[in-house]
Amino acid sequence: LKTKKHRTRLKMPILQPQDKQALKTRLRKELKRKITINLYTLRSAGLLFLPGRECPSCPQMHELLEEIVDLSPSLNLEYFDFYTQPEEAQSEGVDRIPCITFKAGEQNYPNIKYYGVPSGYEFAAFLEDIISISRNVSPLQLPTRKALRRLDKEVTVKVFVTPG
């Protein structure tokens, strides 16, 4: 399951029209390179799910990403079915769904992953990541980047966000 860009929508939009217009303007101004958003998800067969393979937020994630990608020709969306395409998920270190990773040109960004739906305050961070990747710059302050360069072993930082 690897599909590019557009499909016909039958659901209510997630983003409000005024938000879409503001995002479209911002993406037009700030994106410098083409970005591919990779969505690791579950191919739905209607309302049937195999036990242990449920993903209640996958349809919402899918819809949100399609709305975002529709706002800019610099954005592309690729889908990977977590269960029928496990090699793609494993190569990117994806261990659960829904998950988003990024690619700019031929450069993958496997260390940046979003699990779950980036909504609320998470949406702003998600948008900043897309823009930072497109510009090929780090949003971190210079002293932070210098401190990180001095690390002599790999470090994993996980940020957990809950609604409210």
Image: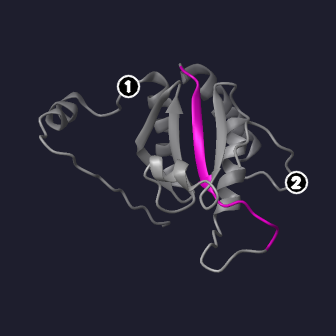
Q: Which residues are magenta?
A: 33-47
Where 10 falls versus 6 (above or below)? below
Asked whether 16 or 152 is in front, the reply is 152
Where 49 falls versus 105 (above or below)? below
Residue 6: percent from left, percent from top: 79, 38
Q: From this viewpoint, is residue 50 visible?
A: yes
Asked whether 157 or 121 is in front, the reply is 157
* 39 inside magenta stretch: yes
Q: With 116 as the anchor, is 149 left or right in this view?
A: left
- SS for callout 2: loop
Q: Amino acid at mark 2?
A: Leu
Q: Specify how the rendered protein is coloured.
A: one colour
Q: With 66 as the anchor, is 155 left or right in this view?
A: left
Q: Which residue is mark 2?
A: 10
Residue located at (46% from left, 34% from top):
108
Q: Which residue is mark 1?
A: 137
Q: Amino acid at mark 1?
A: Val
- SS for callout 1: loop
Residue 73: name its quadrant. Answer: top right
